[in-house]
Image: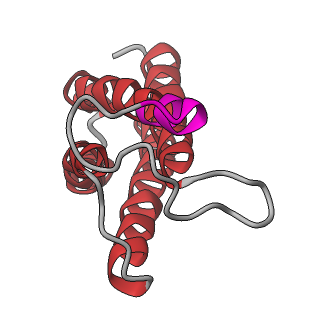
Amino acid sequence: MWERLSDSRVWLSAATLVATVATAGSLWFSLGLGLTPCDLCWYQRILMYPLVVVLGVATVEGRAAVSRTALPFVGLGLILSAYHSYLQATTAECTLGGPCAAVQWQSPVIGLTIPNLSLVAFGLLAVLLVGMWVRVGR
């Protein structure tokens, strides 16, 4: 039993770290760099920010079953960030309003934009939560 609890805490700690870094990064882009989030960015934030608390509490309590709560948020975030990344790659018009296709920032090293980073974060969360669910079996 202790081994399963310890194993789930490792997965949950990693997921909490990813959600925390993503949240801090989004706040840095808006508060630190002064970038105004578009509509799709706001929706992605709405899905990411609660995961810091949900996954953090689950880590402390060792509740692997939290994946049932977190995966719908992660799945919607994956869809939105993939759509947002697609809009920027194709410079198509955003159907939700706002300048969602505009690239406000791009990594000088690896070339990722803000929606690409969001896609990576939601993807990592999906891998960690599904991996934990499969490994721990809850």
Quarter of the picture containing the C terminus is top left
* Nearest to the observer: residue 7 or residue 25: 25
* Nearest to the observer: residue 2 or residue 60: 60
Residue 41 higher or lower than 64, as above or below? below
Q: Is-magenta flag for residue 87?
A: yes
Rendering quarter of residue 110: bottom right
Identify the image's colour scheme: rainbow, by chain, secondary structure or one colour. Answer: secondary structure
Query: Magenta residues?
Result: 84-92
Q: Is residue 56 left or right of residue 81?
A: left
**Image coordinates for residue 2, horizontal then vertical, percent:** 43, 37
**Image coordinates for residue 134, horizontal then vertical, percent:** 49, 14
* Nearest to the observer: residue 15 or residue 89: 89
Residue 73 higher or lower than 33, as above or below? above
State the residue at coordinates (45%, 67%): 25
Rendering quarter of residue 26: bottom left
Does residue 116 appear in the picture of this structure? yes
Q: Is-magenta flag for residue 14?
A: no
State the residue at coordinates (54%, 37%): 124
**Image coordinates for residue 95, horizontal then vertical, percent:** 25, 28
* Nearest to the observer: residue 70 or residue 87: 87
